[in-house]
Each structure stands twice: as structure tokens, then as C-alpha cells.
Image (cartoon, rainbow, N blue to C red):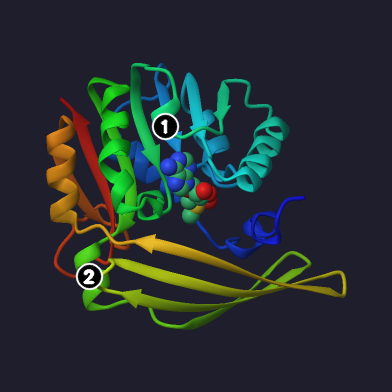
Amino acid sequence: MVRPFARHYDSIYSDKDYESDIAALTKMCGEDLAARHVIEIGAGTGNHTVRLARLVRKLVSIEIDADFAEMAQLKVQDAACTNVDFQTVPLEELPPFDFDGAAAFFNVLNYIAPERRQSLIEALAARLKPGSWFVTDLWNGELVLLDPPRPETREKKCGMTSVRQEITPVLDALAGTVRLSYNIEVEQKGSIERFTEELTMHVWRLSELTSMMKQAGFSDIEFRDRRDFPAAANEGSWHVWMRATRR
Ligand SMILES: C[S@@+](CC[C@H](N)C(=O)[O-])C[C@H]1O[C@@H](n2cnc3c(N)ncnc32)[C@H](O)[C@@H]1O
């Protein structure tokens, strides 16, 4: 049974603009994707997956959370995306491959604990062709530590579904984490489902990420402000896009 957070994810994030993420990716990778073989890390419920699949020749998409993977696979099937090879194993366990590009949307790197950072980036570098690209968005660690997320309540309506999401963040600056506790209420057809979800976001300082990427074989690492895209990231950019080129 898929847990409620994954089952209701699309209602909880119904205001997320997936099209603009795909537009940012196509701008940042700077090439026509029609002939490209691309890998997506962290498919979630597959909202980027089905959009990206329409642009590329072939897409390998990875999601390691079984509940999200189940939701994403259903979406890929419903959208008849026959060029998607869906995987539920970590990138490090995928066979070697020469991808033309890689994407990870909506803070996937912030899910990666420090002890796995190096191996993930090396595994990615090992599967990308020379000259290929990696595009992702993430929290800017320097700014998160200065101005951590605050408690908030989000309420939204998606068709006949109403969502109320209370978010309680707890920063542990020494550990470099922000623990996000969600209390969620979803009302559908007169019945209310209440559930919780806990996420640990790992803070990456962009300087640290840059040197790790260079060491693994990436170059031309650039950051852009996510809110003011395509402007270059600046000292006030809390959320950024990164593009790196595989040497
Ligand atoms: C915030 S969600 C984003 C999902 C989707 N891209 C979206 O925007 O709706 C991040 C996803 O990355 C997945 N994830 C985290 N670490 C991963 C890894 N090492 N490999 C594959 N997926 C991972 C999580 O399970 C989670 O579903």
C-alpha cells in the first residue's frame, strides 16, 4: 500500500510548475534533446519524467523510494512513454553507460547524506560521455545556514481536493541538515485523511559541491538563481540551478 504522502504528492505540489523546470533544463543544457539518451535521478511521482520523455530519444529514470517509484511507473504507463526505462536501484548499482546528459529536479541532491555524496557524483561522472551535461536544482547551503526555512502552513485546492500542509523545519547547523516535519490534511469527497512525513534535507555549500564536482571530472560549473532564472546566482540566491559539463 502506497503511503499517503506519495499517494497525495501531486495534490500537495499541485502548484509546482513542472513545465518551467523542463524549460530551465532545456535552456541550461543548450542543445536539442531529440537524439539524446538522458538519465533522470529522483523521479518522485514522475511529473518531470513524462515531460522529459517527450523531448529525448531515451530516458533512464531512477527512483529509490518504492512508493514514489510505484506512482511514477503508473504515470509513465498512462502517458504511454515507451522510451522510459524505469529503475529502482541507486545510480551506483546501474551498469556502466554513456549518457548524453543527466537531470535531477526539485532538490534531489539535498536528499543525499554527506557520506554518499562522493560516490554518487563519481557514479554519475562514470556514466556520462565527455562533453555531456548535468543539470539540477538545489538549496544553496551558504544561504540556508544564514536564513533557514521557517515554519509555515500551505493551503491549496486541486480540483475537488483540498490540502493543508503544516511545515516545521529544524536546522541542525553542525550536522548540516534541515529536518522537515510535515503534518498534512487532505480532504476529498467529504472525507479527511491526516498523515505525517519527515524529510531530512542535507545542506551542500556550493563551494564544496563545486570542488567535489571538479574532482570527479566535471568542469564549467555554473549556478543560476532559480527564482530569477536565468540570472546568474548571487549572494542572495537561496535556491539555485547548477549546470556542469563532463570533461
Ligand atoms: C523532492 S522529490 C522530487 C521528485 C520529482 N523530481 C518532483 O519534482 O516531483 C526527490 C526525490 O528524489 C528521490 N531520491 C533521493 N535520493 C535519490 C537517489 N540517490 N537516487 C534516486 N532517487 C533519489 C527521493 O526518493 C524523492 O522521491
Give neighbour class at mark 1: few <14, some 14-19, many 20+ (Cα, 10 Å). Answer: many
Residue name at image x 32 percent, y 22 percent: 127
Instruction: Give the structural element (helix, strand or loop) at label 2.
Output: helix
x, y percent for residue 124? 31, 31
Which residue occupies the foreground of this view, 14 or 62? 62
Q: Amino acid at mark 1?
A: Leu
Which residue occupies the foreground of this view, 5 or 38? 5
x, y percent for residue 92? 39, 30
x, y percent for residue 195? 69, 71
x, y percent for residue 34? 43, 21
Q: Earlier in the sequence, mark 2 or mark 1?
A: 1
Instruction: Give the structural element (helix, strand or loop) at label 1.
Output: helix
Which of the numbered marks, if any, corresponds to residue 91? 1
33 left or right of 128 in image? right
Q: Quadrant of residue 160?
A: bottom right
Which residue occupies the foreground of this view, 120 or 59? 120
* Label 2 residue near ligand 1, CB within 8 Å: no
5 left or right of 102 in image? right
Q: Which residue is mark 2?
A: 143
As measured in the structure, the alpha-carbon distance from the residue carrying label 2 to the one carrying label 1 is 28 Å
**Res 207 seen here:** yes
Residue ranking furthest to the right? 190
* Label 1 residue near ligand 1, CB within 8 Å: yes
Which of the numbered marks, if any, corresponds to residue 202? none
